[in-house]
Image (tube, helix red, strand yellow):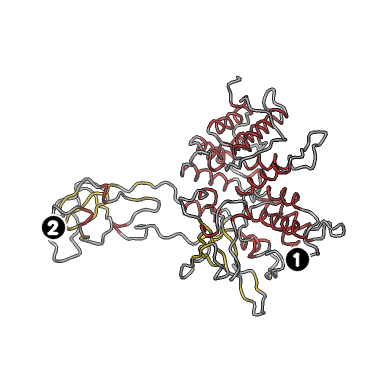
Amino acid sequence: MSDLPRYEKLPLFNPHRKTFTCEHQGQHVPPVDPQAELWFQQALALDDPNIYVGKRDYPKIYQLYTQAAERNHWKAMLNLASLILSDNAGVPVHAREVAIRWVEKAMQLGVPDAYDMMGTYHQTGMIKGGDATSAYAFFQRAADMGSPSAQTFLGFKMSGNYDSPDGEFWGNATIGMEMLQCALSQGYGDAADDLGYLYKDTTPESKLRALKVFHEGVKLGSAKCANSLSSEFSGLGLTSGRNIVGHIDEARAERYSKLGDALEFYGGRLKLPNLDKVLPLPPAPLPKWDGDIQTLIDGAKAVTSPPKAQQGAALPGREFIPHGYAVSSLEQSTMAVAGNQIVPRDGYWLALYGAASTPKNQQIPARRNTPERYQAGERFDASSFAWLTVDQVQWHYLGEAYALPPQRDDFLKHMIDAGFLREVPEPASPVRCNGAQRCPQTGIWEGRVADDHPMAALYNRWDRQAFVEKDHAFPQPAAQFIDVAAHDLQWTYLGSPNAETGMSGIREIGL
């Protein structure tokens, strides 16, 4: 029993540690299989908070999570463990040991969040012999490995001004803040709420810093941050001097409150990277709003352009390739026959012309340069060029169409259907800018670093977008404690500016 991961011998928690190295979870988790990811997304879509709990298809959700987990999808493993331990009647399995084993499997794969979850199991007595001492050892290991949830939990606990006599918090604010900043750099929104309260002070600089970090947390999906800002704009702490805004702004308070309700409803899955489109910080004027909460959500969430048509999917007849399928490339072809022969095998063929000694990748198209499907026993069609005789055409065999693994567009469609992405028309002409430049056009922009950048895995996320006004600076990665220089960023314009109202300086939320 002592060899099980749940009993791993770990160094005791040290709340007075002197150093902390920020590790990112994404650098340590196993690669995700695309099919497993699609099953995971399908399970999330079925576990829709808009559907009454008793009406959700939990057997199907359980099945999809299990399929994904069996392909080493670590998030599916942890979600499956939580589902098993839930009290939802439709879940096929409610066995504590099964849940623990899924978490242990994720631990064996080196998943930081799995160590964090195991710490919770120790703390709640699910593990025989577990207690607060063993729990905090697991939390510490998880934080050091890169778990943003563990970094947030311990970071706040360690950020006191002194050691609490009852062991509830410790006075190690320097390390505690480093942990919280590390969690925020990974997109963990609730870390911003803790940081915001730690930043709050009586100086104008500290208040502005707190205001900005709370606002950043709302973009990252934190209901806590939205509710904190709703209270601040409603005037909380105004008479004592602790209010970070300095005045009452009921219009902003209402919008933060509405968004806070939505973020809590979706349990952190909804992200609002384009929050500044519907709710910019003062002194920027608020755009006019129709009062519908869905308008705020749609305006603030991430956007995507319509998917580009798959090659061959819209072509007629023999050239048609079903969506989600592809044929092998010419380079992979190992069979070629002349056009005056009967088709020897079912599948897709490509017609080319050239001397026998000419490499096939240098031959010229004899028809429309697209694969065409024939059945064995049929006769190849003639060339599109009258000067080419049938026997001069070489038909290269590309095989049957094969199923592609799930593609980016498949995932985006799921995000759109689930309400987490909004589809917008593609701009008429592409506009791109270096991150050190000023924004040339008001609207939504998407930021990216080169794929070979050391921070690419951390920075290049689907929700790395921002609503930026013309002539303003693009968001700086340092605001999220990410070590990326502005000039390493490329921002691409996605459109969706707010609509003009005809009144100077006043716009309305445009979708």
Q: Which residue is drawn at 75% across and 56% down?
A: 206
Q: What residue type is labelled 2?
A: Gln
The x and y percentages for residue 291 are 70, 66
Q: Which image quadrant is residue 137 in?
A: top right
Crowd rating for badge 2 (residues with CA inside 10 Å; few <14, some 14–19, many 20+): some
Q: Which residue is drawn at 60% across and 65% down?
A: 473
User: For the residue labelled by badge 2, is the local secondary structure a helix, a strand or a loop?
Assistant: helix
Distance Cα–Cα, label 2 vs label 1: 76 Å
Seen from the viewer's position, the closer of residues 169 and 220 is: 169
Give residue 267's position: percent from left, percent from top. Answer: 66, 48
Of the pair 462 and 270, the residue shown nearer to us: 462
Horizontal side of 316 relative to 101 (left or right) equals left
2 or 1: tag closer to the N-terminus? 1
Q: Where is residue 385 in the image (x, y as percent from the top left)?
A: 18, 65
Quadrant including the C terminus: bottom right
Q: Quadrant of residue 381?
A: bottom left
Q: Identify the residue at horizontal 46%, vertical 44% (top origin).
A: 34
Asked whether the beta carbons under mark 2 and mark 1 sit within 8 Å of each other, the answer is no
Q: Which mark is residue 411?
A: none
Which residue was labeled with disc 2? Answer: 392
The residue singled out by tag 1 in the image is 251
Q: Position of residue 342 (x, y in %)?
A: 16, 50
Nearer mark to the viewer, of 2 and 1: 1
Screen quadrant of the N terminus: top right
Disc 1 residue type? Ala
